Amino acid sequence: MTERVFAETVRRAGARVFRVGGCVRDRFRGAAAHDVDYVMTGMEEARFRALFPRAEKIGKSFPVYHVRIDGRRAEVSFARREVKTGTGYRGFDVTFDPAVTIEEDLCRRDTTMNAMALELPAGTLIDPYGGRADIAAGIIRAVSAHFTEDPVRALRAARQAAAFGYAVEPRTIGYMRSCAAELQREPTERLMGELRRALMTPRPSVFFRVLHAAGLLSLTFPELAALSGKTQPTEFHPEGDAFEHTMAMTDAVAAETDDVLTRFAALVHDIGKGLTPAEMLSHHYGHEVAGLDALAAWNRRMTLPHAWMKAASFVIRQHMRAPRLTHIGKIADLLLGIGVSGLSMEQFAVIIRADHGALPDYLAHGAEYLAVMLRVTGRDAPAHLCGTEIGAWLRMARIRALQKYLKERAGDPFYSAENIAVLDRRIADMKAGKISPNMK
């Protein structure tokens, strides 16, 4: 069924149908819409089911249906009014009947750019709250004080600012601030969903900055808020304190990769600095260890995906030492560690380059070097070895393989003939059973 056939069927039944939400907003932004949603007024539910018997009902507290339109499954809802009766996003009494107008339905929405409708089939714009003008001006504006009735709208407004490059106007910042009490009682899954979407925007820092301006960052992501005011040595971080550095680095990584895992690891690489005592500033000795504690606290409060925890923990531990290694064994261990961190070599390199401004040779060619080491496997170990001895032998054999490879690269600064000779003797002694692979 085409949209025109759908709209004309609804019209012949004496009702009205509108495109609503993001698809209307994106049309006036000049962007492609991902989904198309519809709202009907003047329609009885029984009449709708008779007209569209294949429609699948998905709404529980009010009628929402999936209907196949233009080859896609579209969401079709009945216009409704909402009255706040409790807390959170479930604390509403919902009224839906044929008498509810499109203007009443739009009034319950969060921001003006999301409170427009196109009446079908002609496509006439219904814009009672000035959404089109706010889009043209690049402004995010709450429709009304109803904005505060769902506290997660505060995070959504901050995310839209990051996604579209818009500014949140002052009254709406005030509404966001008034969401603080209820926001603390919201399910962490909702906050996690907004965090994930914010990390997918072109400039994730805007999301956190807007929350900071509204006084909500310390409630939602306190580990990041704690970075504000934590000074750093200006010769290494001229952009300012640890919060400013983190925001700049997160945006720099976002400009290089769409991968959310990498972006999150960059976001939290320095969160240990938020725990630095005032008397230690502007230095942050041991912030790698403190960072793991801060990440664990975040995970206890808001369960993070296992892959995020694994990659972020590795970056927190390694981001300071990763570009400064000179010993071939430590370089090999780092490269092997990246291989099991959940990050690709390229993704890890993006983070280190954003943090330090450049890459050493062993990270610039890390994927190549890692592949050389991984050619050596446990199957190559001497038959008399077992258990942890195989792992120790495998590590040394891989280091040897990397050193031999580096020898072929003329002038490589990490090649040492003396070190290779030592390794050769130890590997030979292991094969002969003269020494244990676990010996230092």
Image (cartoon, rainbow, N blue to C red):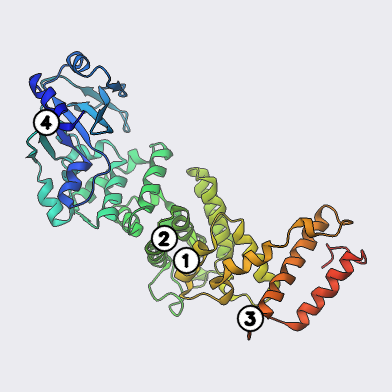
Distance, label 4 to label 3, CA atoms, is 71 Å
- Vertical position of residue 4 compared to residue 374: above or below: above
Q: Which residue is mark 1?
A: 350
Q: Which residue is mark 2?
A: 257
The crowding category of the residue bearing disc 4, from other C-alpha atoms within 10 Å (few below 14, some 14 to 19, many at least 20), is: many
Amino acid identity at mark 1: Val
For marks 2 and 1, the one nearer the N-term is 2
Mark 1 and mark 4 lie on one chain; the one further toward the N terminus is 4
**Closer mark to the observer between disc 2 and disc 4:** 2
In the image, taking residue 41 as reference, residue 440 lies left or right, namely: right
Residue 110 is situated, as x and y percent measured from the top left of the image, at 21, 40
Question: Label 4's element?
Answer: helix
Circle nearer the N terminus (3, 1): 1
In this view, the residue in front, 159 or 168, is 159
Mark 2–mark 4 CB contact (< 8 Å):
no
Q: Nearer the viewer, residue 106 or 54?
A: 54
10 Å crowding of disc 2: few (<14), some (14-19), many (20+): some
> Which class describes the residues within 10 Å of circle 1: few (<14), some (14-19), or many (20+)?
many
Q: For marks 4 and 3, give the one nearer the viewer.
A: 3
Q: Which amino acid type is marked by label 2?
A: Thr
